[in-house]
Image (cartoon, rainbow, N blue to C red):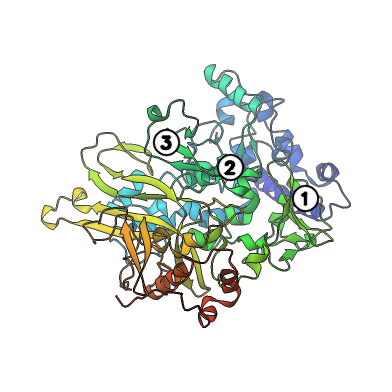
Amino acid sequence: MDKIKKTKAFFIVAFLLFSLLFLVKNRQLFEVEEAYKIVKENVYEGAVLAASESCFLCHQNTKGYSQHHNPKYIGCVSCHLGNAASSDKELAHKNMVLIPGNLSDAKQTCGTCHPSELHKVENSLMTTNSGLIAVDKFVFGEAGSLNDHYHIKDLNQSASDKHLRDLCANCHLGAEKKSFGPINQLSRGGGCNACHLNYSDEAKHDLERYVTSSKKNVPKFHPSTDIFVNDTHCFGCHSRSSRISTNYLGLQETLLEEKDVKNKSDYKILEDKRVYKYKEEDVHHTKGLLCIDCHSSHEVMGDGKKYAHEEQAVKIQCIDCHFKDKPNTILYNSLDAESMLVYDHRAYTHQDKPILAVKKSGHPLVNTYVDSLGDAYLIGKKDGKLHPLQPQGDICSRDNAHKNVSCASCHSSWTPRCIGCHNEFDKDEPSAFDLLDKKFTKGQWKEYVAEFSSSMPALGVRENSEGKIIEPAIPGMIMTIDLNSYSDKTSEEKLLFHRLYAPNSPHTTTKEVRDCKSCHSNAATLGFGKGMLDYDINNQKGKWIFTPEYALNANDNLPEDAWVPFLKEIDTKTVNSTRSDFRPFALKEQQSLLLVGACLQCHKDNSKVMKQSLELGINTLLKNKHSSCVLPDYTY
């Protein structure tokens, strides 16, 4: 196809897309099939060009395409490039892209029809890995801020860069998919393919036959490119780091090996041979909900803005579906173009009902609606099942004492913890592999973890211009870094130590909530680390005594898994978090929490006085405390 024809085809395709959007907007007048018929007959000359492509001389009667990526309408070269004007095999395949959709070719392939989506993806944290790089450079002493912006493609060979190349640089959308086949647990990157590539059973069978026949049996079933994203698409990258994919399934990582759990039903071996133990799965997973039932296209692909960390990019909150009073909604006729297309591709029919919209960003959740009675529903993207959305429980809506406590703080059943992480460079490692450049090299950073475990999450304080809120936290980096092992400067031997907790979204939601003592008199929750926290009363004076479970770390004399010292002032100059706006409880906050913990030694969670404290606050009730009450004495 010469340059003039390509230009003409591009404008025709653009006109088609705008025409389709108009027809979608007026779906009450036209059914989808009728819309395609009208477009084909009246406006889409591009279909004639597509039908004339030489690709069809060999690739006849190929099936499996999604309705909206059928080569009958868009041809083959719009995705695979090549020369569709030549009937010669070699010339026709010249400059062809076998696996289109990688970010390296997306501007010439997917981006020609989806430029807005490509722009968003290119700026998203899943592409840049900026937050991950910023934290890593900070802990290596190569940057003074946790919030600087980076792009993983720009990594060089500093100690931190090499660390990322060796251990982390696989999980970004720019990593290329170079082999045929469906997305699985081992998949990383792939650009648009990472979410939108789907293989049917027939396509898998044809691919296997194609490979085993030395590429002689050309597949008849083509993989589909569509919006039907399942949890496997998320798993490859999100079963790492905070492990939200495995958490959601109810799986906790262990240090065991495959041979250790043979024939044990309470363990699961992943495709990469990591061994996980079954725990409690997220309540949303038990209902059959997918990741994308909450995290819509607007959030997954991003909004085009650059964010320092993932929690800034995530806009959805529990209260968007489980609202207190009236939900935030948007009308069908006000949907943006992207949402309208998703709505149409999924063949939804609730145009006459308000659709829930995310409070923070306003983007719609097109798989939801509110009926005439004010009841909200979610349509599961996995199976189309209708799920009633329950509003906040009475205890949450009338609770004044916990207004600044996030839903996840109370409704997360567990979260992973790891401690004792040591990083050392082995300069003699012969089979080191650079995950960014995808090549073998010599010398590799190695990470040694002392223990994987789980517990209810610790809690910390997010404090910034948006306000102050208590959120879950996990030991993010209780670690040592042997910088000397990476450098030949033995005279400047340097061992870095960090005790950093990280904000965490556990994705282990339960309907039930943690009990009051698990927050107000639990050492790990308060940041002291696991151990026995006892309230000792002697001579009408109360005293909290903590006995840690782990030995003290020689670097700072704190228990191995602790975040802060027990009931002592915290040095505000000490960096103890992977975020500049997230911190542990200050001393006065610890004392306030333990004050309630002292009351809970006698008063049960559901007692009248404790219920009153939720509405009135503990200080109001203390004005009329009984003479037998013994409050903590913090003068020791």
- With 597 as the anchor, is 24 left or right in this view? right
Q: CA distance from mark 2 to mark 1?
A: 29 Å
Label 1 sits on what residue type? Leu
Q: Which percent across, then down, holds residue 150?
A: 41, 59
Front residue of 16/190: it is 190
Q: Earlier in the sequence, mark 3 or mark 2?
A: 2
Q: Quadrant of the N terminus?
A: top right
Q: Which percent across, then down, holds residue 210?
A: 57, 21
Please tell me whether mark 3 or mark 2 is closer to you in this view.
3
Q: Which percent across, then down, holds residue 426?
A: 23, 42
Q: Earlier in the sequence, mark 3 or mark 1?
A: 1
Label 3 sits on what residue type? Arg
- Residue with the mark numbered 3: 274
Please name the residue shown 78% across and 46% down the image.
347
Secondary structure category for the residue under label 2:
helix
- Report which quarter residue 321 is drawn in: bottom right
Mark 3 and mark 1 residues within 8 Å of each other at the beta carbon:
no
